[in-house]
Image (cartoon, coloured by chain):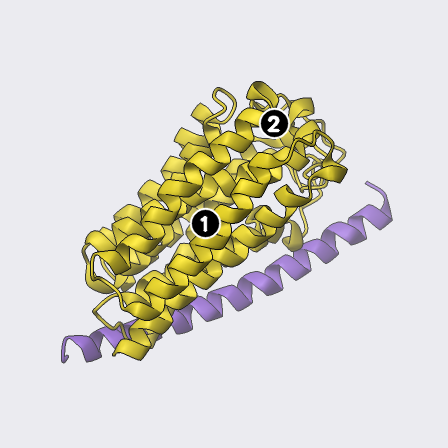
Amino acid sequence: MTPQEEAEVRRRQRTRSILMAALLIGFAALVYGISIAKMGMYGG
Amino acid sequence: MSTATHSLPAAMPAEWRDFLALTKPRVMTLVVFTGLCGLLVAPVQLPPVLAFTAILCIALGAGAAAALNMWYEADIDAQMKRTASRPLPAGRMDRASALHFGVGLGVFSVLLMGVATNWVAAAILAVSILFYVFVYTIWLKRRTPQNIVIGGAAGAFPPVIGWAAATGDVTLLPVLLFALIFLWTPPHFWALSLFVRTDYANAGVPMLPVVAGAKATRVQILLYTLPMAAAAVAPWALGLTGAVYGIAASVLSAVFALMALQVLLNKATEAQAMGPEKRLFAFSILYLFALFGALVADKWIGA
């Protein structure tokens, strides 16, 4: 693998990791919201 | 199965944009819209967070089905101008990544739907994904010119899933909405396949214009338009909706039928002379958006 390809791999890994982190944070927030809504529905 | 060659070095990971492209985001707009309308016309109102989650799950499920479709069809896509630049045929992603992404997204969407709303909606979502991948993509698409009819059933599920997410059951109105999209799909897609015919012929997909000819396809378009119009007006005729929807459905369906008649009368075999076909295809998209929009408007005005 040439140094250019090596750099391209790192760049793609970085953007994918950042995106994954953002999605996981969003998912955690969504599950929190679902929990609150469910507790409201069943009067918990 | 694909024999597409990869220009991708083994260790080069695909760009995130290519994963997004696997989900066919443009097709998703109609899926999300009809799913949302199914949810909004249901007699039970979900808390906003749960309604959002239900629509998100429908979108993710549709994305999963699209990704698995592209995973299986990379060889066909490589032979058509319209699809040759998709991530797999263009060699920007390896097939295993597409498969893992599709299966993972599908399982995730079904589980999240079950946890957030109910397992009836989750089960219908699972059936719709499996139906699209196994019955349509793998089994029938390459075997029968009626492939689009069967594929239409997969696209008809979203309003039923939206309704079930809110109510936990399926009654006559969501079934009629299913029938409407199911019967709408053949005229919609066959109008398109008339003017992109050569592409499908090259890829060996048995599209109706390829195996039965343009004339038979034009007859079939009109033959499906009539029961489609009946399904569109039925919710009003059966007293399930008000006059706002009834009038919109009657007028829009009459225009649709008139355009289908113009297609029937057109004798052109070259794409340049297929004005009526292109107009019908463009109108068919507007038709579905307007009809479902009218359904929601009708409920809000009547409430």
Check the picture and name the quadrant holding the N terminus of chain B. Answer: top right
Badge 1 density bin: few <14, some 14–19, many ≥20, Cα 10 Å:
many
Query: Could you say which chain is coloured purple in the image?
Result: A
Q: Residue at x 73, y 36 (%)?
A: B271
Choose top left, top right, bottom left or bottom right for residue B182: top left
Left or right: where does residue B188 sit relative to residue B196? left
Of B217 and B18, the residue lying toward us: B217
> Residue B135 shows which numbered tag?
none
Tell me the shade of chain B. Answer: yellow
Residue B186 at x, y percent in the picture:
47, 38
What amino acid is found at the position of numbered circle 2 in the picture?
Ala
Vertical placement of residue B243 versus B25, above or below: below
Outermost residue on the left side: it is A43
Residue labelled with disc 1: B62
Q: Residue at x 41, y 74 (%)?
A: A29
Per the model, the C-alpha gap separating discs 1 and 2 is 31 Å
Q: Is residue B122 visible?
A: no
Secondary element type, mark 1 = helix
Residue B232 at x, y percent in the picture:
35, 53
Judging from the image, mark 2 belongs to the subunit labelled B
Vertical placement of residue A9 versus B217, above or below: below
Of B207 and B218, the residue lying toward us: B218
Contact, mark 1 vs mark 2 (Cβ under 8 Å): no
Check the picture and name the quadrant holding the C terminus of chain B. Answer: bottom left
Badge 2 density bin: few <14, some 14–19, many ≥20, Cα 10 Å:
many
Left or right: where does residue B9 sit relative to residue B278? right
Judging from the image, mark 1 belongs to the subunit labelled B
Residue labelled with disc 2: B214
Q: Residue at x 67, y 42 (%)?
A: B87
Vertical placement of residue B101 versus B59, above or below: above
Numbered disc in front, either 1 or 2: 2
